[in-house]
Image (cartoon, rainbow, N blue to C red):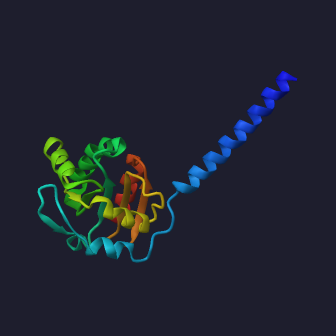
């Protein structure tokens, strides 16, 4: 009888675990992007880490990697040096990379001074979470990386730390 009880509890736990995994996969799945999300992105003017305004409209008609990140997000910070290296590698072919920080200006400024990157780090604060959601990141989780083609279409998106080979493949398709 005791063995049956433990077996039943094990089956029940596995069922709840499977249900939890299903819920998480739905919550953290990337959905369809709002048609106007990219246009909203290009309409933004955000301060860089030094407080200078940067109009994202200057990125139109260029292949662009947009990385949404925060200083308090370990996977975001881990992937940034690799993203900087990719930017250096593809810059001569016209690729632009921009990091949009969902964080405070003082935190991003301090981070930028301590860990300079080869691409601009812009300050959007929590206001960018709505844009992230409109780009298909329903959970608003970070990091979130989007590759835009020259025509402004979304060529690739990933939620969480990017896989280098996948990002490089997406970049190659838009160059």
Residue 38 image offset from top left, x and y in percent: 35, 72
Nearest the eye: 160 or 47: 47
- Check the image and report above or below for 39 versus 2: below
Residue that lies at the very extreme toward the top in this rendered image: 2
Q: Is residue 151 visible?
A: no
Q: Could you tell whether 91 is left or right of 135 in the image? A: left
Residue 5 image offset from top left, x and y in percent: 82, 28
Q: Could you tell whether 94 is left or right of 4 in the image? A: left
Q: Quadrant of residue 47?
A: bottom left
* Residue sitting at x 28%, y 49%: 83
Total numbered badges shown on the rendered structure = 0
Image quarter of the C terminus:
bottom left
Residue 97 image offset from top left, x and y in percent: 25, 58
Q: Is residue 155 visible?
A: yes
Image quarter of the N terminus:
top right
* Residue sitting at x 33%, y 46%: 76
- Check the image and report above or below for 96 versus 10: below
């Amino acid at each position: 009888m005791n063995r049956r009880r433990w077996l039943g509890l094990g089956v029940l736990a596995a069922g709840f675990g499977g249900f939890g995994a299903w819920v998480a996969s739905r919550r953290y799945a990337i959905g369809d992007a709002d048609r106007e999300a990219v246009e909203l992105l290009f309409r933004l003017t955000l301060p860089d880490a030094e407080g200078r305004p940067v109009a994202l409209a200057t990125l139109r008609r260029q292949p662009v990697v947009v990385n949404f990140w925060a200083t308090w997000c370990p996977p975001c910070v881990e992937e940034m040096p690799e993203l900087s290296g990719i930017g250096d590698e593809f810059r001569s072919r016209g690729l632009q990379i921009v990091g949009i920080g969902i964080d405070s200006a003082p935190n991003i400024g301090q981070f930028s001074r301590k860990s300079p990157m080869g691409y601009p780090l812009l300050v959007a604060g929590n206001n960018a979470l709505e844009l992230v959601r409109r780009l298909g990141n329903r959970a608003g989780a970070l990091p979130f990386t989007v590759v835009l083609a020259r025509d402004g279409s979304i060529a690739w998106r990933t939620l969480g730390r990017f896989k280098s080979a996948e990002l490089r493949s997406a970049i190659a398709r838009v160059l």
